[in-house]
Amino acid sequence: MLRVGIPRALSYYKYSPLWTNFFTKLGAEVIVSPPTNKEMLDLGSKYVVDEICLPVKVYFGHVNYLKDKVDYLFVPRIVSVEKNEYTCPKFMGIPDMLVNIDNLPKLIGPTIDLTKNDNKLWKVVLEVGSFFSKSPYLILKAWLDASIELKRYNQDWLNQSFPKELMVSKIDKKQEQEILNIAVIGHEYILYDKFLSMNLLEKLAKLNISVFTTEMVNQKTINKEVSIIPKKIFWNFAKSALGAACYYNKKEGILGFINISSFGCGPDSISNSMTVHQLKNAKISKPILNLTIDEHTGEAGINTRIEAFYDLLKRRVG
Ligand code: SF4
């Protein structure tokens, strides 16, 4: 049985049910790297220049973990997943940067660029599937079956809950303490990576804070919210973050925001300042805690800031 490695980083958090099920249904053994740890970050950092953002450094650590354990490594070049919108230059350059790692297995590195023509996706599916099957019928069937899993994963978020795969702690609703609702804005590969986010979601759950995230807002709403911006935002991540923040600012019951981002992130530098600007100019303005992380960020400092933010929210609700 052929083994395919999928790094538990970057696009994994958005598409894992799709790709893992697709490869499995085509008869491959899928090996996903374990959750991020310090060793992975240290090893990953060796392969990239210092200026690279933390999630990409971690990605390299995951690749390094997998490289001797698999026949193929799945490293898509994701350029665009929506018309006239793009991911980010670092996302697009991942397969090129991997040349810094010696003795890599064979790469499955399709270019996913849906900017102009959605039909291209079928070509990608057939190209990737052909590593494991010669039958276009079986490949397309595997894809359709896997797409159902992705739909369920996304629907969990839209139902205001976290997909089970992410193992996010739930609030114990039996406790006497009041539950506070906040929005947390940030890339899913930071927020749901417990090492990178320093267990932010667990920390909030312990404080009885219920979290609403970007993924819980549907695309139609996001597009409507950003339509007030005079210039089109063509960075997909920045658009989603801004749209979700504007939506949650109006949503009753949401008391404030935590914005978590990586030091050195280009799209976040745009979305963070646009978000702050939009929220400050909105009729209702809610408090924001900005957390910018890099490999030197200390957990004690993050804890202190979360607790101070919690106290502020508690004072607001009286
Ligand atoms: S969007 Fe930001 S955090 Fe994500 S890969 Fe690009 S630079 Fe890094």
Image (spheres, rainbow, N blue to C red):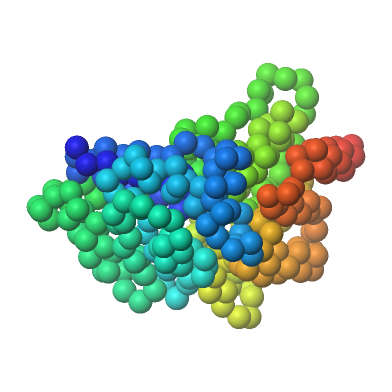
- As displayed, is residue 306 above or below residue 296? above
Residue 104, image x and y in percent?
A: 36, 53
Measuring 31% from the left and 63% from the top, which residue is drawn there? 110
Residue 159, image x and y in percent?
A: 50, 41
304 and 122: which one is in front? 304
Residue 23, image x and y in percent?
A: 26, 45
Q: Is residue 145 left or right of residue 189?
A: left
Measuring 50% from the left and 43% from the top, which residue is drawn there? 157
The answer to whether residue 285 shows anywhere in this view is: yes
Measuring 10% from the left and 53% from the top, which residue is drawn there? 134
- As displayed, is residue 250 above or below residue 61? below
Q: Which quadrant holds the C terminus?
A: top right
- As displayed, is residue 213 above or below residue 165? below
Residue 281, image x and y in percent?
A: 79, 68
Q: Is residue 208 left or right of residue 134?
A: right
Measuring 46% from the left and 67% from the top, which residue is drawn there? 93
Q: Is residue 61 left or right of residue 264?
A: left
The answer to whether residue 254 shows anywhere in this view is: no
**Residue placed farthest to the front in the image?**
102
25 and 226: which one is in front? 25
Q: Which quadrant holds the N terminus?
A: top left
Q: Quadrant of residue 153?
A: top left
57 and 280: which one is in front? 57
**Residue placed farthest to the bottom in the image?**
231
Q: Is residue 75 left or right of residue 181?
A: left
